[in-house]
Image (cartoon, helix red, strand yellow):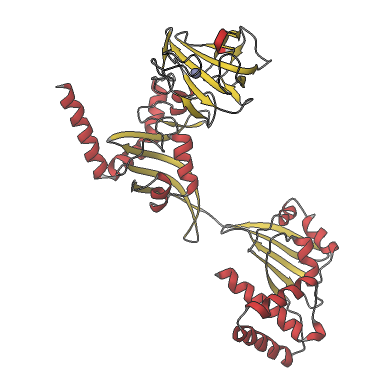
């Protein structure tokens, strides 16, 4: 709305200039704008503006405006804008090369305003570009050169609590509760990625509470920072996380009991391929698609294009790498905790970097999807073994390694996180009731 206003004002000025022909600074762009004015703008507004400006022009001399609010159009930059106002490359260089900040004038956003002020000789006096609520780029003439600086307004950091109930999705209900998309992404992709499958687990009436950083400038929300603490109540079960900065300055999310969530979930990845579709589930009584008889399917198949990288799900050592009958090209990783093994079959090729006995880190590519062995098409056949027994990789309870905790850690952790955890707990009586109910259910089950 605001931009429209500026634009029509600017268009008005342009046409006023054109009307007082003697001084029109006509460039192809102006001509184009004029054409669009006559076809788009309602005559009344157009004429009123033109008349008003034209009238002023009659009283004084027909003049070019010295104060211009230029609305930045797509594809524009200073070197295309300057000639529109009779400014030369020399002036441009003086600004963009004045200092490190000068170069930031290269980064102009469409629809924002560039304020151009000219002196009596129509040389540039100052250039002001408000990048956002906080930052303003300013170039002002100082003798033969320009002083270029970035003004920054002071931000007020606040902590905000948002709360909501799921009616459709985290994305919708989160935004309704005032959460920014960036905060919602952090919750879903980073903090709770391993514990909650937001597409599958989230149900209507589930609840969330989020405490997050929020910077305010001139009373307006400017930017959201980090999530400080959050809780989801999913089907009565509570999942909480709190941000904690350790002595070395590492920032991670912890459970209220002081477990590092990332380290917990890092032991094993749930899937060796990112964003792949499961084409065949773990099934001990499956009819084999090629052999056409009941044969246990002791793993999960992921449909993926030939050549898709396959990652080892956890740290360990390659104990097998070669051909294995119907499995084709296979890699088996023995994980650090010797209880666990993972197997990847039907590969088109191996990663040449690793041999039998090579150490691998979680996420290392051990090979590529193919259809070697007995396979109808390219896919990954993935198996996960616990103490020698095949388990369903999609549902197996994965081990959680806990970081070492000492008294100093506990004291520091409590001091830093308790205020947020208290706020989470106190924030909602609903939540407290649900917790009490869940606890009650548990106790009843025990009896
Ligand atoms: Zn399979």
Picture residue at 40% right of the left edge, 48% below the top: 174
Q: Is residue 83 visible?
A: yes
Could you tell me residue 66's position as x and y percent?
73, 76
* Rendered view: 438 above or below 10: above
Give the residue at the far bottom of this rendering: 59
Could you tell me residue 81's position as x and y percent?
76, 65
Which quadrant holds the C terminus? top left
Could you tell me residue 248's position as x and y percent?
53, 28
Give the residue at the far front of this rendering: 292
Q: Nearer the viewer, residue 191 or 346?
A: 346
* Rendered view: 319 above or below 225: above
Could you tell me residue 5's position as x and y percent?
59, 74
**Would you say 241 lies left or right of 189 here?**
left
Q: Nearer the viewer, residue 327 or 270?
A: 327
Picture residue at 74% right of the left edge, 90% below the top: 60
Q: Nearer the viewer, residue 276 or 57?
A: 276
Q: Nearer the viewer, residue 177 or 308?
A: 308
Q: Is residue 225 visible?
A: no
Picture residue at 15% right of the left edge, 26% below the top: 444
Picture residue at 62% right of the left edge, 87% below the top: 48
**Would you say 136 lies left or right of 14 here?**
left
């Amino acid at each position: 709305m605001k931009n429209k206003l500026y634009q029509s004002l600017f268009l008005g000025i342009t046409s006023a200039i054109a009307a007082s022909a003697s001084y029109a600074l006509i460039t192809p762009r102006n001509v184009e704008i004029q054409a669009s004015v006559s076809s788009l703008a309602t005559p009344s507004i157009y004429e009123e503006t033109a008349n008003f400006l034209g009238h002023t022009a009659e009283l004084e001399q027909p003049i070019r405006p010295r104060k211009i609010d230029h609305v930045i159009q797509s594809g524009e930059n200073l070197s295309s804008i300057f000639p529109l106002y009779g400014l030369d490359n020399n002036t441009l260089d003086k600004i963009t090369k004045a200092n490190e900040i000068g170069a930031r004038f290269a980064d102009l956003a469409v629809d924002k305003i560039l304020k151009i002020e000219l002196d009596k000789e129509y040389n540039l006096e100052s250039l002001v570009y408000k990048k956002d609520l906080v930052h303003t780029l300013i170039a002002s003439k100082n003798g033969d050169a320009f002083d270029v600086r970035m003004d920054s307004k002071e931000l007020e950091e606040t902590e905000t609590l948002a709360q909501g109930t799921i009616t459709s999705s985290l994305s919708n209900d989160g935004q309704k509760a005032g959460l920014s998309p960036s905060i919602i992404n952090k919750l879903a992709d980073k903090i709770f990625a391993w514990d909650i499958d937001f597409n599958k687990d989230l149900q209507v009436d589930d609840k969330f509470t989020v405490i997050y950083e929020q910077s305010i400038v001139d009373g307006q929300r400017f930017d959201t920072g980090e999530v400080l603490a959050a809780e989801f109540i999913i089907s009565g079960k509570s999942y909480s996380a709190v941000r904690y900065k350790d002595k070395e300055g590492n920032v991670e999310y912890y459970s209220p009991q002081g477990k590092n969530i990332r380290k917990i979930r890092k032991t094993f990845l749930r899937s060796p391929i990112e964003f792949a579709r499961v084409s065949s589930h773990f099934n001990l009584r499956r009819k084999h698609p090629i052999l056409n008889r009941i044969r246990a399917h002791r793993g999960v198949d992921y449909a993926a294009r030939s050549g898709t990288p396959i990652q080892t799900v956890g740290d360990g050592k390659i104990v097998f790498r070669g051909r294995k009958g119907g499995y084709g090209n296979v890699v088996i990783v023995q994980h650090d905790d010797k209880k666990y093994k993972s197997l990847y079959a039907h590969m088109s090729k191996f990663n040449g970097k690793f041999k039998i006995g090579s150490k691998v880190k979680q996420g290392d590519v051990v090979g590529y999807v193919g259809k070697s062995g007995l396979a109808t098409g390219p896919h990954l056949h993935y198996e996960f073994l616990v103490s020698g027994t095949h388990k369903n990789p999609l549902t197996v309870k994965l081990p959680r390694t806990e970081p070492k905790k000492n008294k100093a850690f506990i004291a520091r952790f409590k001091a830093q996180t308790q205020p947020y955890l208290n706020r989470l707990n106190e924030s909602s009586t609903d939540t407290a009731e649900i917790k009490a109910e869940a606890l009650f259910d548990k106790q009843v089950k025990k009896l």
